[in-house]
Image (spheres, rainbow, N blue to C red):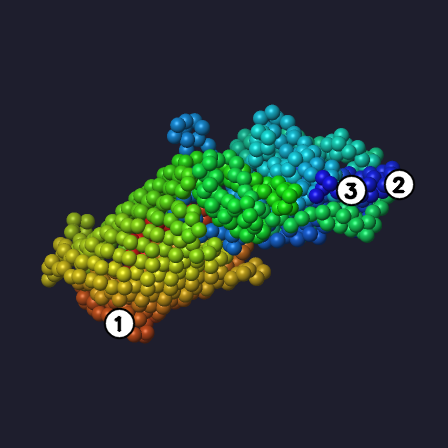
């Protein structure tokens, strides 16, 4: 290890410096994604054999400078930053292989979550970051810890002596990292407010170094006093604030002006042309090229000031001597900090490293770490490694920051159609020897109202499982209208009420899949008119049916968004048994009908395959297949029968439409999707779907039905949607077209256009 090595590398550097008495320092500014230009700068300097003897950096400059100082080549650094994994981490998207579907709570219409402190509401806080930090923290540990441990946490003992800067906003001062945990130092330097969560180092909450010193040339001079300073700057001071721009006001309040100049006598300033936003992760290769070309344009001035050269073989020898001392990261123990004893035991059970002799390679540990990070009781994880001299393994030091036990979330959907829905959820989560959760959610609007109370208990045994008792009330209010906003031209023709309670059992069958068993009981009531000639004073027909149900489901889900996904896979296989009593009561518009009661017993099976394939250029393809079998026989009349039939609803808006043509007891359905990835979370989606029913209910007379058992009729729908995936939720502009169907409210036009913001996500229907 580094603390015992013969300092031949340091001797080599000192001899090379003394040969001409000249050293070169490289200063790398912050600037978010624009900082990738620094990679091109390093590549150009290496190409011209310009030595780099010292490095100082801030934010992105700290990451790139830290990697280079840790023995990574410019090409390796470029590969890291251009990888899909890195880009997803910076956007807060986790690789689908490391999602843990078992721990994901069911999707709701939530936009934002606010932790609550019930003892002191004044201490209730808003989230401090847009990007979940735990995945990024682990990857930084994996790339930086080997070098930090070789250097014995002394940044002067890295392959290239290094400094980075963070900001202490309490004392309004810069913090210079010279030693300590390398991952911690660089992570603090890049903690841009409201984007990345800050971290605490030795009791200080630290933010992005760029707040107070975004171009640490002064630190380069004071710490190392090199003969020549080469600076790469991709940033600048904030523009003066304007009265009506709150963002510019906040930035000017937080960010101090930095000096981006260098003394022309011993300094050369490189300023790559990077006209993009700090968090724009498109066209990253062009940023690197910009840094390279900007350096080449300044190379004559650099070569005039730097007489010494470092040949490629000399640089390779330096790097090899340093990297050869890195050891494989084998973790044999875990120490959990920031939680009580019971909570630490739970976490160790999840990581499966509670025994001293249970050694884990990094990839296996990474999988279990990500599973732990999916727990909504944990807000962040920060891993560090400590070397064990006796067995050359490592102890994982895991700093855990728990969420507040109470939180409230808000959301819903705003639409140009009269289906606006609000959402509020209140949640209690507690972590002890077991993981407990109690959730209350409520939806409210003209079309949909629902309330659900649900509990969850997780058992972190070798056979991991959870139990979830639930109670749910839901009401759907359908109306035959394509009007916009609240201009309803007709009263409701169908109101569905559900009361359902039961118990869910689930267990993971892999990182992205789980097995579920549901036991449920409830009562369903449909109020409807079987004629178009009715008024608000009429009494609807009513069918009610108390039902007992048992279901077994297996699901795999790697979708990246809960609505309008553009990558990932969703596979569902479900088997359900139902036992019900149908009770019919005629209303004021019924003719020749009377009270009716009948028993029904049936099984249902469903298979769903929905896949978005890997992107090719600016577009990706998707496809879906759904097969449904229901053994249910018809009810007393046509409307009641079609209401109980399974429904094909591939597009979000179809959940708010009562489409008789897309309901059948048995059917096969397929769809194709073409998605154009425009830029910055903008997608253009073109979708087409076909439903092929086998046992379909058709209307014979006003109240009578006939069961069609053939493949003669089929139904299609198409959709074009422009979607922007905002941090709160999707904003969509969409048009749907329905082919050759006889829906009453579509007779004037088979085209539906709408604009919506938010999620068309509701509580699960009882028998889905």
Label 3, on which residue? 6
Task: Report the front residue among 755 and 332.
Answer: 332
Mark identifier at residue 331 = none
Q: Are marks 2 and 1 in contact (CB under 8 Å)?
A: no
- Mark 2 is surrounded, within 10 Å at the Cα level, by few (under 14), some (14 to 19) or many (20 or more) other residues, namely few
Cα distance, mark 2 to mark 1? 93 Å
Instruction: Point out which mark residue 19 bears.
Output: 2
Secondary structure category for the residue under label 3: loop
Report how far apart the C-alphas of labels 1 and 3 lie in the structure.
Answer: 86 Å
Percent coordinates x, y for residue 383 in the rendering: 57, 41
Task: Say whether residue 540 is left or right of residue 402.
Answer: left
Residue 60: tell me if it is visible: no
Compared to residue 544, the image places residue 63 above or below, namely: above
User: Residue 751 is drawn in which quadrant?
Assistant: bottom left
Tag shown at residue 708:
1
Disc 1 to disc 3: CB gap under 8 Å: no
Density class for disc 3 (Cα within 10 Å; few <14, some 14-19, many ≥20) is few
Q: Circle 1 sits in a helix, a strand or a loop, which is it?
A: strand
Q: Nearer the viewer, mark 3 or mark 2?
A: 3
Nearer to us in this view, 235 or 394? 394
Disc 3 and disc 2 in contact, CB within 8 angstroms: no
Q: Which residue corresponds to the image point at 35% horizontal and 69% vertical from the top-left?
A: 692
283 on left or right of 468: right
Quadrant for the C terminus, please: bottom left
Tag 2 or tag 3, which sits nearer the N-term? 3
Indicate the position of residue 732 as horizontal and vertical percent values.
44, 51
User: Where, quadrant-wise, is the N terminus in this rendering?
Assistant: top right
**Image check: 221 left or right of 752?**
right
Residue 54 in the image, given as x and y percentages of width and height: 76, 39
Query: Which residue is pictured at 22% across the width and 55% down the height?
Result: 547
Pair 2/1: label in front? 2
């Amino acid at each position: 290890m580094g603390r015992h090595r013969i300092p031949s590398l340091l001797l080599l550097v000192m001899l090379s410096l003394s040969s001409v008495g000249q050293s070169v320092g490289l200063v790398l500014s912050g600037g978010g994604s624009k900082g990738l230009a620094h990679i091109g700068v390093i590549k150009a300097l290496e190409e011209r054999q310009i030595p780099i003897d010292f490095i100082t950096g801030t934010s992105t400059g700290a990451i790139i400078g830290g990697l280079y100082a840790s023995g990574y080549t410019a090409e390796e650094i470029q590969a890291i930053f251009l990888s899909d994994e890195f880009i997803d981490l910076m956007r807060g998207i986790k690789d689908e292989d490391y999602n843990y579907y078992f721990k994901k709570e069911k999707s709701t219409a939530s936009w934002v979550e606010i932790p609550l402190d019930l003892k002191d509401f004044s201490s209730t806080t808003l989230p401090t970051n847009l990007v979940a930090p735990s995945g990024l923290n682990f990857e930084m540990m994996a790339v930086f810890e080997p070098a930090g441990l070789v250097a014995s946490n002394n940044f002067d003992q890295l392959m290239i002596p290094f400094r980075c800067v963070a900001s202490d906003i309490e004392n309004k001062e810069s913090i210079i990292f010279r030693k300590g945990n390398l991952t911690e130092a660089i992570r603090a330097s890049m903690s841009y407010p409201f984007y990345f969560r800050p971290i605490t180092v030795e009791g200080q909450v630290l933010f992005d170094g760029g707040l107070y010193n975004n171009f640490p040339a002064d630190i380069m001079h004071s710490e190392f006093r090199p003969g020549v300073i080469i600076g790469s700057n991709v940033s600048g001071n904030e523009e003066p604030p304007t009265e009506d721009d709150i963002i510019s006001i906040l930035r000017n309040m937080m960010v101090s002006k930095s000096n981006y100049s260098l003394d022309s006598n011993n300094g050369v300033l490189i300023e790559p042309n990077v006209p993009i936003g700090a968090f724009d992760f498109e066209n990253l290769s062009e940023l690197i090229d910009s840094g390279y070309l900007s350096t080449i344009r300044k190379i004559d001035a650099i070569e005039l000031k730097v007489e010494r050269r470092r040949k490629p073989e000399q640089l390779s020898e330096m790097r090899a001597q340093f990297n050869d001392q890195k050891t494989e990261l084998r973790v044999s123990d875990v120490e959990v900090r920031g939680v009580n004893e019971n909570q630490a035991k739970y976490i160790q059970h999840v990581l499966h490293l509670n025994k001293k002799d249970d050694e884990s390679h990094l990839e296996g540990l990474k999988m279990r770490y990500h599973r732990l990070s999916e727990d909504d009781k944990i807000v962040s994880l920060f891993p560090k490694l400590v070397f064990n001299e006796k067995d050359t393994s490592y102890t994982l030091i895991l700093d855990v920051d728990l969420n507040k036990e109470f939180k409230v979330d808000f959301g819903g959907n705003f639409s140009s159609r009269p289906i606006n829905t609000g959402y509020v959820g209140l949640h209690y989560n507690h972590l002890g020897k077991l993981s407990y959760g109690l959730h209350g959610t409520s939806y409210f609007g003209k079309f949909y109202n629902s309330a659900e109370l649900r509990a969850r208990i997780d058992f972190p045994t070798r056979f991991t499982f959870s139990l979830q008792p639930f109670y749910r009330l839901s009401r759907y209010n359908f109306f035959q209208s394509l009007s916009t906003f609240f201009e309803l031209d007709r009263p409701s023709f169908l109101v569905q009420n559900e009361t359902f309670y039961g118990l869910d059992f689930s267990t993971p069958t892999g990182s992205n899949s789980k097995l579920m068993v549901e036991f449920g009981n409830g009562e369903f009531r449909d109020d409807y008119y079987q004629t178009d000639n009715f008024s608000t004073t009429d009494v609807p027909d009513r069918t009610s049916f108390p039902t007992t149900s048992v279901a077994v489901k297996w699901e795999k889900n790697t979708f990246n968004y809960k609505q309008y996904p553009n990558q990932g896979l969703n596979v569902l296989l479900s088997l359900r048994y139902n036992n019900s009593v149908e009770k019919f009561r005629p209303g004021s518009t019924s003719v020749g009908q009377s009270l009716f009661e009948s028993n029904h017993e049936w099984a249902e099976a469903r298979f769903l395959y929905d896949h978005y394939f890997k992107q090719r250029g600016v577009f990706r393809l998707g496809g879906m297949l759904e097969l449904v079998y229901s053994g249910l026989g018809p009810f007393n009349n046509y409307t009641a029968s079609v209401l109980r039939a399974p429904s094909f609803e591939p597009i979000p808006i179809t959940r708010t439409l009562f489409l008789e043509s897309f309901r059948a007891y048995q059917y096969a359905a397929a769809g194709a999707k073409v998605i154009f990835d425009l830029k910055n979370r903008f997608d253009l989606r073109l979708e087409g779907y076909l439903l092929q029913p086998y046992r379909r209910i058709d209307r014979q007379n006003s109240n009578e039905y006939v069961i069609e058992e053939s493949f003669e009729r089929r139904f299609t729908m198409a959709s074009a949607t422009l979607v922007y995936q905002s941090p709160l939720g999707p904003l969509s502009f969409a048009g749907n077209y329905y082919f050759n169907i006889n829906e009453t409210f579509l007779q004037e036009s088979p085209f539906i256009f709408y604009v919506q913001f938010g999620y068309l996500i509701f509580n699960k229907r009882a028998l889905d």
